[in-house]
Image (cartoon, rainbow, N blue to C red):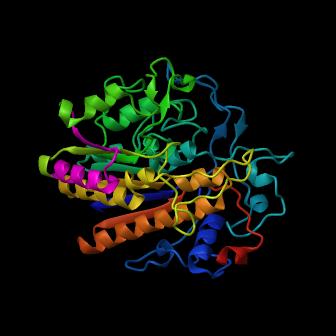
Amino acid sequence: KKRIILFVFDGMDWQTTRAAAIAKTRQVGYEEGRGSGLHFQDYRGTTTDFGFFVTSPHNSGTSRNVDRQIVTSPGGKVPGGYDVTRGGPTPWQATDDLPYPIGKSETDPHAYTDSAASATSLCSGIKTYNDAVNVDFSGREVLPIARTLQAEGYAIGVVTSVPISHATPACAYANNVDRNDYQDLTRDLLGIPSVFHPGGLNGVDVLIGAGWGEVEDKDGSQGANFVPGNRYLSDDDLARVSVDSGGKYVVAQRTAGESGSDVLATAVQQAIEGKHRLFGYFGITGGHLPYRTADGDYAPVRSVGNPNTAKPEVYSPEDLRENVTLSDMALAAIKVLDAQSQRWWLMVEAGDVDWANHSNNIDNSIGAVISGDEAFKSVTEWIEQHGGWDDTALILTADHGHYLTIDKPEMLAH
């Protein structure tokens, strides 16, 4: 295929998908299988399929040295694994062994995956330890498919609703023994010398995500080369990649008083006309895009216990106007990639589904699924208008779940 899209709904298990479908359609429409109600469930514009898979890691509890980029305890503390007779043969069948899926079985403890191990599996095809970004259980580099395709002439894009170098987008392209080494992961993505690649990688052609405005004075997880300031991208690195300083990227970032969608659209046009790469940087306090919420009013309810109840996020008019949506990001990336090459690979991540589920916030979770579904719809419409599916392959998947249990699904319909 000439156009390949990996669409990841981070943390969206079968139950989260069903919750969003119920909330959107106002009815409990299914109890098993693929389901219906969301665009990605109902789309039949080409041949489609449905399935599920296990994303257990190689292990958890691996120690590593981020400055030396080595693993110091190969194999870690707890092995991964999955017993279908205990966890259940399908995602919709409840198990009687409730502690088992979350690794709390007294007789058979096991590790359950994080986003780094699962995204490494998706992008590089191996099992590895939790927190690894495209390295195996012993810390050896593995090559993500995007870099293989890039060497064959494909343009590469990465889009996410959470920070640009969080685990899933990082695994699309970068290498590191620790998913929390954010600035170095961004360097890999943008083709700047990093602790893992001192000579620098080629860099992706399009990177658009959140993390703008997130400032830290110290961050021990990022090693000795951490630069105080933006947690995900230092000011010097941002200046270095910009075409204004002789770099390769037209930079679009959240700008006071300006529409985020307009800022991004202008940068897309500049990148296409100048044959440049594109880097987009947006977000709110916390490092993600604003949650649209279940009813689309961008007014989240409070998060219930993880471990404590948290106040609801409150967005200013500027937070909404100066940012973009995942749909905006995905279409911007496609336009630039398609202008650069007839062959391209793109990851689109609805990463805020995971963040909402971590916070036990069903309002944000449903809203994030629907935002991702709207982005998926925008992508399918673009494909239909630009040559159709003959040259396009799209894989839509989750990477793990959160053990969401819905006792009264009918309540979500009201």
Numbered disc total: 0
* Residue found at the very far right of the displayed protein: 106
Quadrant (top left, top right, bottom left, bottom right) of the C terminus? bottom right
Q: Is residue 253 left or right of residue 32?
A: left
Q: Position of residue 165 (x, y in %)?
A: 45, 39
Q: Position of residue 170 (x, y in %)?
A: 44, 41
Residue 244, above or below 398: above
Of residue 199 and residue 384, the one placed in the foreground of this image is 384
Q: Is residue 22 left or right of residue 307?
A: left
Q: Please tell me in which quadrant of the rendered image residue 62 appears.
A: top right
Q: For residue 253: magenta?
A: yes
Q: Tell me if I can see residue 372 in this picture.
A: yes
* Residue found at the very far left of the displayed protein: 273
Q: Position of residue 181 (x, y in %)?
A: 50, 30
Which residue lies at the image location 28% right of the left edge and 67% below the top edge? Answer: 391
Q: Please tell me in which quadrant of the rendered image residue 34 appears.
A: bottom right
| Residue interval drawn in magenta | 247-272
Quadrant (top left, top right, bottom left, bottom right) of the N terminus? bottom left
Which residue lies at the image location 32% right of the left edge and 36% below the top edge? Answer: 190
